[in-house]
Image: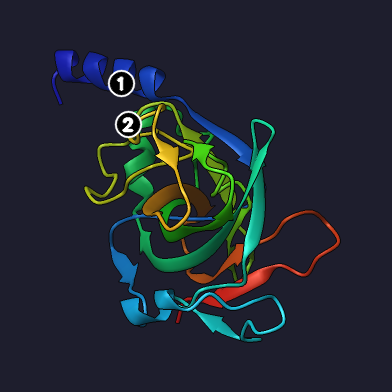
Amino acid sequence: MSHSQNQHSARLGRRLGLIAVGATTACTLTACYPSTGDSAKDAAPSASQAPKKLRLGQPGPEQEISSYKKSAKFVFTPTKVVEGKPEDLDELDEPDKYAGKKVVWVYVNARHTGGDALKEPPPVMSDVNVETASGPGTKFILIGALSSTPKDCHLLNGVKELGTEDVWKKGEERDVCDPYLVPEGAKVDKVTYSQGYYKEPLRWSVK
């Protein structure tokens, strides 16, 4: 790599800045776990009706989200997990910080099922995470976007590609995606959703 390319890479790394915001989830484009089908999103089970063992592509029970003094209900359906490579993080130019890590992108279909219309971005991904055999991943906010970010990854709580003045109304849905960090040798086993510390998290099996 030339001196000018090194300077460009360093500037890009500083401009991106990857900030960890909690102990959550995962990694790169070498593996993709698809959903079990789009038809499952049509159902909106209540908490008592939700399957005990959810799989990717199955909707969870309704969840209530509040934003700017308004409240709405959503149904979340994790659809796939795309795993990256450890070298995806090289452009951040912080090898010590990200040693032994890789990034994963989690895709979720979010459907507004009732309540107030909310301005985007409501925090639909704030309580989503991943689990590996070695524990939960770490959720990240990207200030900018990695060059390896999948083209179909429409970031919501990270780099937001949806308009800030968009209004999310009942019956509307969005397919969104957020990045997580996991150990470079780990595989994502589950996508989780948890509000608060007193409820058992919802878990969707990836395999």
Q: In the image, is 29 to the left or to the right of 98?
A: left
Name the foreground residue: 141 vs 166.
Answer: 166
Q: Are marks 1 and 2 in contact (CB under 8 Å)?
A: yes
* Rendered image: mark on residue 91: 2
Q: In the image, is 122 to the left or to the right of 71?
A: left
Residue at (47% x, 79% y) in the render: 43
Label 1 crowd (10 A; few <14 / some 14-19 / many >=20): some
Q: In the image, is 19 to the left or to the right of 109?
A: right
Residue 32 at what x, y percent from top left?
Answer: 31, 68
The three-letter code of the residue at mark 2 reads Glu
Residue at (43% x, 26% y) in the render: 143
Does 34 appear above or below 159?
below
Instruction: Name the residue that disc number 1 marks.
Output: 12
The three-letter code of the residue at mark 1 reads Leu
Residue at (40% x, 51% y) in the render: 177
Determine the residue located farthest toward the right in the rendered image. Answer: 198
Does 104 appear above or below 13?
below
Viewer can see residue 37 = no
Residue at (39% x, 51% y) in the render: 176
Cα distance in 3D space between marks 1 and 2: 7 Å
Helix, strand or loop under label 1: helix
Residue 136 at what x, y percent from top left?
Answer: 64, 60
Residue 118 at what x, y percent from top left?
Answer: 53, 39
Q: Earlier in the sequence, mark 1 or mark 2?
A: 1
Q: In the image, is 7 to the left or to the right of 156?
A: left
Name the foreground residue: 42 vs 52.
Answer: 42
